Image (cartoon, helix red, strand yellow):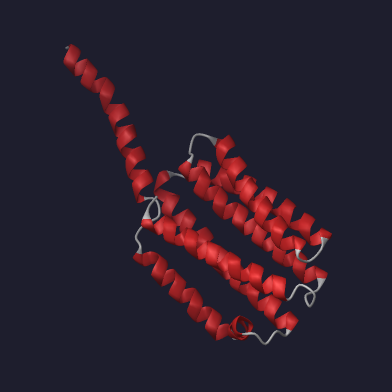
């Protein structure tokens, strides 16, 4: 696992933990409709992001990548939706299921030269959506906690978004190790028949 991928996973885990903490604190103050939006958005984007990551990592085995990505999307979307009620719970599960399947297919079909770009783009979408949902929860609940007061200011969220992007880029590319290994494997497989023919002649 590359340092870039590890840093991305840590950022995703940190933001998800913050979302769960804020949602748990304010679950009685947030309307069911907003809870459904939160569960649907997180379930979908986590399913897509995990699907692309697993689809690239397990390229050639769509079943495994689909199972892993759907599991993450369903578990995270359903767990977050369960804080707001059974309808939001179902919404999170179904969104995670759909996002996981679509993400796995995208990761399987994307060309190797677009591995980095597709993963980075979905990571940016995850950051944007997560910060918008955090802002939605905090504004609707009127919470005065430290994290809530920080998230109430759009400028703070924008600065945090830019800092996360800059810091994640410092750790290098996400797929350098995997892409290089696959490239070397394909190169050796392509060159092997020519080598054997040359040896035979």
Q: Nearer the viewer, residue 16 or 108?
A: 16
10 sits left or right of 82 in the view = left
> Image quarter for residue 25?
bottom right
The image position of residue 5, as x and y in percent, is: 43, 56
Residue sitting nearer the eye, 160 or 105:
160
Q: Which quadrant of the view contains residue 195?
A: top left
**The C terminus - image quarter:** top left
Decide: is 45 above or below 165. above
- Residue 124 versus residue 65 in the image, above or below: below
Q: Residue at x 34, y 60 (%)?
A: 172
x and y, in percent, of residue 118 in the image: 48, 54
Indicate the quadrant where residue 62 lies.
top right
Up-down relation of residue 191 to residue 121 (above or below): above
Name the residue rendered at 64%, 85% in the picture.
145
**Which residue is at the far top?**
200
Which x, y percent locates residue 66?
60, 41
Q: Look at the picture and state if 19 lies above or below 179.
A: below
Residue at left offset 69%, top offset 57%: 77
Number of labels in the image equals: 0
185 sits left or right of 84 in the view = left
Question: Residue at image x 69%, y 48%?
Answer: 97
Residue 186, percent across and down? Answer: 34, 33
């Amino acid at each position: 696992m590359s340092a870039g991928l590890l840093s991305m996973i840590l950022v995703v885990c940190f933001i998800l933990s913050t979302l769960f903490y804020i949602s748990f604190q304010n679950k009685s103050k947030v309307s069911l409709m907003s809870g459904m939006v939160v569960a649907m958005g997180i379930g979908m984007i986590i399913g897509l992001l995990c699907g692309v990551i697993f689809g690239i990592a397990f390229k050639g085995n769509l079943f495994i990548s689909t199972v892993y990505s759907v599991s993450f999307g369903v578990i995270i979307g359903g767990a977050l939706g369960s804080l707001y009620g059974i309808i939001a719970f179902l919404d999170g599960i179904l969104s995670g299921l759909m996002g996981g399947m679509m993400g796995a297919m995208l990761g399987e079909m994307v060309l190797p030269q677009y591995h980095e770009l597709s993963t980075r783009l979905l990571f940016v979408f995850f950051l944007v959506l997560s910060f918008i949902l955090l802002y939605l929860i905090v504004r609707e609940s009127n919470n005065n906690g430290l994290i809530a007061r920080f998230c109430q200011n759009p400028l703070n969220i924008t600065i945090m978004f830019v800092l996360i992007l800059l810091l994640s880029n410092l750790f290098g590319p996400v797929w350098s190790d995997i892409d290089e290994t696959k490239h070397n494997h394909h190169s050796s497989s392509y060159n092997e028949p020519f080598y054997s023919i040359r040896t035979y002649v």
